[in-house]
């Protein structure tokens, strides 16, 4: 007959050492959690992310004027749109229909 053996439980050791110079953090010490994500609500209309292929010299011209070149390109395009909308009447082109 075989005798049953029982495994001994491991000794309980504490890895925490009481250090008066470095106390454990408490919820009061940390305060309320602060979550910051993104820019928050926008005050101006949302812009559309797009991809536009520009000539290298045009892009270099706007970049050479300093930071904010994308906004300057947007303003130049806006001025062109406004000039075309208010400067000349819109005409429609008729298509020839094959008979």
Image: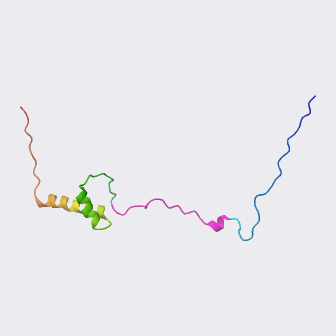
Q: Looking at the image, which residue is at 7% across and 38% down?
A: 96
Pinpoint residue 4: horizontal percent, then vertical percent.
90, 35
Question: What's the magenta region?
Answer: 25-44
Residue closer to the observer: 91 or 61: 61
Asked which quadrant contains residue 40, the reply is bottom left
Location of the N terminus by quadrant is top right
Location of the C terminus by quadrant is top left
Can you say whether 95 is above or below 2 in the image? Answer: below
Asked which quadrant contains residue 58, the reply is bottom left
List the single residue furthest toward the left. Answer: 99
SS majority, magenta: loop
Pinpoint residue 84: horizontal percent, then vertical percent.
15, 58
Q: Looking at the image, which residue is at 50% across and 61% down?
A: 36
Q: Looking at the image, which residue is at 87% across and 39% down?
A: 6
Pinpoint residue 2: horizontal percent, then vertical percent.
91, 30
Q: Looking at the image, which residue is at 30% across and 61% down?
A: 70
Residue closer to the observer: 67 or 80: 67
Q: Is residue 12 left or right of residue 63?
A: right
Pinpoint residue 97: horizontal percent, then vertical percent.
8, 36
List the single residue furthest toward the bottom. Answer: 21
């Amino acid at each position: 007959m075989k005798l049953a053996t029982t495994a001994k439980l491991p000794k309980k050791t504490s890895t925490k050492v009481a250090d008066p110079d470095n106390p454990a953090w408490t919820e009061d010490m940390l305060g309320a959690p602060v979550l910051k994500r993104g820019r928050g609500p926008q005050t101006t209309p949302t812009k559309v992310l797009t991809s536009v292929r520009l000539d290298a010299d045009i892009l270099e011209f706007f970049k050479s004027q300093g930071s904010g070149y994308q906004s300057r390109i947007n303003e130049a395009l806006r001025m062109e749109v406004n000039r075309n909308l208010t400067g000349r009447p819109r005409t429609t082109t008729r298509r020839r229909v094959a008979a």
